[in-house]
Image (tube, rainbow, N blue to C red):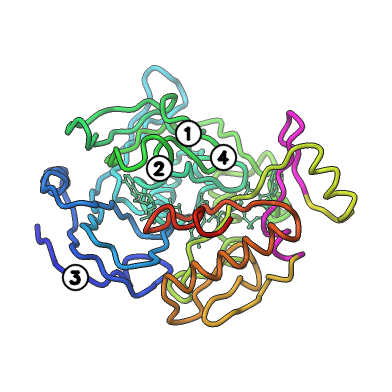
């Protein structure tokens, strides 16, 4: 294992901002990971494919790239019709989903083509088209940096929520996820197609004849037609979470904007697509300097070419400040930022 000094991260994260890590190493085995974490170099940051991070400055410590590989599946003896799947944290998520489908397993099809590693998926409980990782996850294996040992964490203790988990809250920085355990369907798949454009894309296949792979193909087609490829246009997917507002604020917004798009969440709460707010606020396709809101999906902030992390951060703050002034809604970033804490301190 090689530890390198002053390494450019430009190709290690999908915003492609030209920042440097003071130290950088790849962990291909658990023993590498443990040795690096025990080296005492701090701060230490675990990086997967960098598709959900924004580096607003050089990283002063050790970046550890997670390259742990391996996956397997067996029939679940206790649960007929189910398959138990294990995947190491460094596996590419999209390839892993495609592999589960090739094994005849269902459940992950709506999560096709999400960039990044399997190990990062629990951090924000990745989700798309009405399915979240936590719907299929049983437990995970992680290295506890505090106690210096491998632990198994059942899904229940991870407090998964909408694009959230304890790994982004009180457990931030404590665990390195090394392996996931999932329970997928091996027969009698129950497909979820009610979301967004998905059902209309599947209209040509009678509902009873649809397979998980049909849903995956539709998801992949929609995503390819709508989202910028980070290899061509730097981005980290949705920059902000979709805000959820309470009844009174919702009524006010609906009176002001009869065309408001919203999704009732129960208990008097309503999810408003952040993309709708950005579109309404004139941010769709808007470019300032070398940063823009994407012209097909404004929630995706893109590096048009050569922007640094600080410039992207300033643009995102401008967007959030404007949305707050227009609609009284505080947008919360979904992307993980380094250095942490800069966002909330400076923006509101
Ligand atoms: P990174 O960006 O490398 O890391 C993200 C965070 O997790 C960092 O804080 C990092 O320190 C931490 N981390 C990474 N690996 C580990 C580990 N093994 N243990 C502990 N901490 C770790 N997300 C969705 O939920 N749904 C989508 O549909 C979706 N679509 C996207 C589309 C595009 C075009 C892009 C660019 C991003 C999209 N995302 C989406 C966001 C992103 O793909 C996910 O958040 C993904 O899980 C990030 O994986 P990564 O390996 O790149 O993580
Ligand atoms: P879309 O289908 O145009 O829908 C816009 C928003 O409306 C989505 O964000 C979605 O919320 C919400 N929505 C749509 N149908 C809904 C329903 N039936 N019930 C509740 N909410 C509904 O969205 P899109 O941008 O093309 O993305 C499609 C899916 O991929 C979404 O689930 C989105 O979250 C996911 N995605 C995520 C990222 C990321 O980086 N996090 C990037 C691209 C796409 P939700 O976001 O809560 O699902």
**Mark pair 2, 4: CA separation:** 29 Å
Residue at horizontal 32%, vertical 66%?
Answer: 12
- Residue 70 is left or right of residue 281, and the answer is left
x and y, in percent, of residue 216 in the image: 55, 51
304 over 188 or under it: above or below? below
Sequence-wise first label, 1 or 4: 1
Query: Does residue 238 show up?
Result: no
Question: Which residue corresponds to mark 2?
Answer: 103
Question: Which residue corresponds to mark 1?
Answer: 136
Q: Nearer the viewer, mark 4 or mark 3?
A: 3
Sequence-wise first label, 2 or 3: 3
**Mark pair 4, 3: CA separation:** 36 Å
Question: Which residue corresponds to mark 3?
Answer: 6
State if disc 4 and disc 1 touch (CB < 8 Å).
Answer: no
Residue placed most toward the observer, 190 or 9: 9
**Mark pair 2, 3: CA separation:** 42 Å
State if disc 3 and disc 4 touch (CB < 8 Å).
Answer: no
Callout 2: helix, strand or loop? loop
């Amino acid at each position: 294992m090689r530890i390198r000094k002053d390494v450019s991260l430009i190709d290690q994260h999908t915003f492609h901002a030209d920042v440097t890590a003071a130290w950088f190493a790849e962990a291909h085995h658990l023993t590498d990971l443990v040795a690096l974490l025990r080296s005492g170099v701090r701060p230490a940051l675990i990086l997967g494919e960098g598709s959900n991070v924004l580096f607003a400055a050089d990283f002063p410590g050790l970046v550890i790239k997670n390259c742990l590989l391996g996956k397997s599946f067996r029939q679940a003896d206790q649960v007929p019709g189910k398959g138990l799947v294990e995947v190491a944290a460094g596996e590419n998520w999209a390839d892993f989903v495609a592999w589960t489908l090739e094994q005849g397993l269902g459940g992950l099809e709506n999560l096709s083509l999400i960039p990044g590693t399997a190990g990062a998926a629990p951090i924000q409980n990745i989700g798309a088209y009405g399915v979240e990782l936590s719907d299929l996850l049983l437990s995970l294996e992680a290295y506890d940096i505090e106690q210096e040992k491998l632990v198994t964490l059942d899904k229940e203790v991870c407090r998964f929520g909408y694009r959230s988990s304890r790994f982004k809250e009180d457990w931030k920085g404590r665990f390195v996820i090394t392996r996931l355990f999932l329970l997928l369907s091996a027969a009698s798949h129950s497909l979820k197609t009610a979301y967004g454009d998905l059902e209309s894309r599947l209209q040509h296949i009678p509902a009873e004849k649809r397979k998980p792979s049909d849903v995956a193909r539709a998801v992949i087609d929609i995503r390819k037609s709508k989202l910028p490829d980070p290899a061509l246009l730097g981005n980290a997917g949705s920059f902000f979470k979709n805000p959820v507002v309470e009844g009174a604020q919702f009524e006010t917004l609906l009176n002001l904007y009869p065309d408001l798009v919203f999704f009732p969440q129960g208990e008097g709460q309503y999810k408003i697509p952040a993309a709708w707010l950005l579109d309404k606020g004139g941010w769709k396709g808007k470019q300032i300097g070398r940063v823009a809101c994407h012209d097909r999906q404004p929630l995706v902030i893109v590096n048009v070419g050569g922007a640094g992390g600080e410039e992207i951060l300033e643009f995102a703050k401008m967007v959030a400040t404007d949305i707050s002034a227009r609609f009284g809604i505080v947008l919360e970033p979904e992307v993980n930022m380094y250095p942490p804490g800069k966002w909330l301190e400076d923006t509101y």
